[in-house]
Image: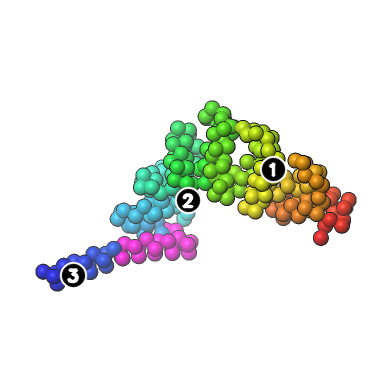
């Protein structure tokens, strides 16, 4: 009996490892650009219950990797993965419904999946919900809620959300005007790679905005960060700054 039990355990372990191997072979095929092979392997893995494989099938059909995009299939696989807790699938479903990608536009479904992903800590969903409340897109405009979601995403170093908090503290949009907080969030966004925040900081130090002293050297540093990312206004202002105050340009 003991030998038989050991044999069953060995067989079960072998099968488990085999299923895992199929999934990772699919990942390898996908990374190598062999999308049709990846599709086949992910389908096998998904049939055995792999949530990640289901999400990856959604991506293949959504993005048209090696095949013609099929949003109906994408939605099918994303939903299966999302119902098992895959946060990326929740977010991708929301995008499909919001942007009517091959399906009828459905704002209710979009918001439902954004909220589910947001509750699970997905920064992109938190930012998109903030933007929806900010502009009143298929929901009543609510600056307070917008800023609540911006803060959730910003605290995960989401650069666009950090930048928007900088803007809202500067302008008093749903928040009490606080220049110190505005600059703090602009600087966080800058460290996260936001070109918009770098341009805003360049303007602040170039012109002495938000109760800051004019500092051409700092202005140059922030303008050049934005300019390197293709910001045309930063490029123009950088050129003007360096002609007027060449000593500030390293």
| Front residue of 75 and 250 | 250
Reading the image, the residue beneath label 3 is 6
- N-terminal label among 3 and 2: 3
Tell me how far mark 2 sits from mark 1, CA to CA. 46 Å
Looking at the figure, which quarter contains the N terminus? bottom left
Residue 47's place in the image compared with 32, above or below, is above
| Front residue of 185 and 159 | 185
Label of residue 64 in the image: 2
* Magenta residue span: 17-37
Element type where label 3 sits in the image:
helix
Tell me how far mark 3 sits from mark 2, CA to CA. 45 Å
- N-terminal label among 2 and 1: 2
Reading the image, the residue beneath label 1 is 180
- Hey, which residue is sitting farthest right in the picture? 244
Element type where label 2 sits in the image:
loop
**Comparing marks 3 and 1, which lies closer to the viewer?**
1
Asked if residue 184 shows in the view, the reply is yes
Label of residue 150 in the image: none
Residue 24 magenta: yes
Q: Which residue shows up at 45% across the image and 48% down it?
A: 88
Asked if residue 94 shows in the view, the reply is no
Asked if labels 1 and 3 touch by Cβ distance under 8 angstroms, the answer is no
Residue 130's place in the image compared with 237, above or below, is above
Tell me how far mark 3 sits from mark 1, CA to CA. 67 Å
Q: Position of residue 158 (x, y in %)?
A: 57, 48
**Comparing marks 3 and 2, which lies closer to the viewer?**
3
Q: Quadrant of residue 103?
A: top left
Element type where label 1 sits in the image:
helix
Q: Which residue shows up at 34% across the image and 55% down it?
A: 50
Q: Residues within 10 Å of mark 3 (few under 14, many from 20)?
A: few
- Hey, which residue is sitting farthest top in the picture? 140
């Amino acid at each position: 009996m003991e030998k038989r039990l050991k044999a069953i355990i060995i067989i079960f372990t072998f099968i488990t490892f085999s299923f895992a191997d199929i999934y990772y072979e699919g990942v390898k095929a996908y990374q190598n650009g062999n999308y049709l092979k990846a599709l086949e392997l992910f389908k096998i893995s998904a049939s055995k219950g792999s949530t990640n494989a289901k999400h990856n099938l959604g991506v293949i059909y959504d993005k048209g990797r090696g095949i013609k995009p099929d949003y109906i299939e994408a939605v099918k696989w994303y939903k299966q993965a999302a119902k098992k807790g895959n946060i990326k699938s929740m977010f991708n479903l929301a995008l499909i419904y919001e942007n009517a990608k091959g399906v009828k536009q459905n704002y209710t479904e979009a918001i439902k999946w954004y909220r589910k992903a947001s509750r699970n800590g997905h920064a992109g969903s938190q930012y998109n919900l903030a933007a929806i409340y900010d502009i009143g897109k298929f929901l009543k405009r609510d600056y307070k809620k917008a800023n609540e979601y911006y803060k959730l995403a910003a605290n995960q170093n989401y650069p666009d959300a950090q930048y928007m908090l900088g803007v809202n503290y500067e302008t008093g949009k749903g928040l009490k005007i606080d220049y110190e907080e505005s600059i703090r969030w602009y600087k966080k966004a800058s460290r996260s790679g936001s070109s918009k925040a770098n341009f805003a900081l360049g303007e602040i130090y170039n012109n002495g905005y938000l109760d800051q002293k004019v500092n051409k050297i700092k202005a140059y540093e922030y303008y050049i960060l934005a300019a390197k990312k293709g910001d045309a206004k930063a490029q123009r202002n950088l050129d003007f700054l360096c002609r007027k105050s060449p000593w500030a340009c390293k």
